[in-house]
């Protein structure tokens, strides 16, 4: 997976597009938010075949059925792990969420994450794990 030459512009446009999009399991949750960001940057759809579950419980069941403990394990199977301190703009971050670990996108000294109330910003210090895009 390689970032496109204009990945920064594409990522910025994607974030602007989803800033007000409501949280909806199977359509726009933390995993699909991050997959959309990765697709904007690379053109690769990491969520192909995963969309459409109707609840977080159903999403977790789909992950378990395919051998993944959670969305972090799925991300780890697709992206190389890096130390949180090494995460750069556009990399994937794992942060604590309301329902367990959540995925987000690193942007400088902050991390964009999707919460039930919409897009939120956390400090970079919230990163527990990170993956290189």
Image (spheres, grey):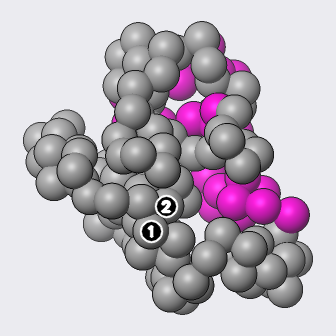
Note whether 80 is above or below 125 in the view shown.
below
Residue at the spot of label 2: 29
Question: Is residue 48 in sight in this rendering?
Answer: yes
46 magenta-colored? no
In what element is the residue under mark 1?
A: loop
Q: Is residue 27 left or right of residue 101?
A: left
Residue 120, position in %: x, y?
A: 39, 33
Note whether 132 is above or below 46 in the view shown.
above
Residue 24 image label = 1
Q: Nearer the viewer, residue 7 or 63?
A: 63
Residue 6, position in %: x, y?
A: 14, 45
Note whether 111 is above or below 74 in the view shown.
above
Tag in front: 2 or 1: 1
**Image-quadrant location for residue 101:** top right
**Label 1 Cα crowd, 10 Å radius (few <14 / some 14-19 / many 20+):** some
Give the magenta range: 69-95
93 magenta-colored? yes
Q: Is residue 124 left or right of residue 108?
A: right
In what element is the residue under mark 2?
A: loop
**Residue drawn where x is 52% and y is 15% of the image:** 124
Question: Is residue 5 in sight in this rendering?
Answer: no
Residue 64, position in %: x, y?
A: 85, 77
Residue 1, position in %: x, y?
A: 45, 59
**Residue drawn where x is 42% and y is 60% of the image:** 23
């Amino acid at each position: 997976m390689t970032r496109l030459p204009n990945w920064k512009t594409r990522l910025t446009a994607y974030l602007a597009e989803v800033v007000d999009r409501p949280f909806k399991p199977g359509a726009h949750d933390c995993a699909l938010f991050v997959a959309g960001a990765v697709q904007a940057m690379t053109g690769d759809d990491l969520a192909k075949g995963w969309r459409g579950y109707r609840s977080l419980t159903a999403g977790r069941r789909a992950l378990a059925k395919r051998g993944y403990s959670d969305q972090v394990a799925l991300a780890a199977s697709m992206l190389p792990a890096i130390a949180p301190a090494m995460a750069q703009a556009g990399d994937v971050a794992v942060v604590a969420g309301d329902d367990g670990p959540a995925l987000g996108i690193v942007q400088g000294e902050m991390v964009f994450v999707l919460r039930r109330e919409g897009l939120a910003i956390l400090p970079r210090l919230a990163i527990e794990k990170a993956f290189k895009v």
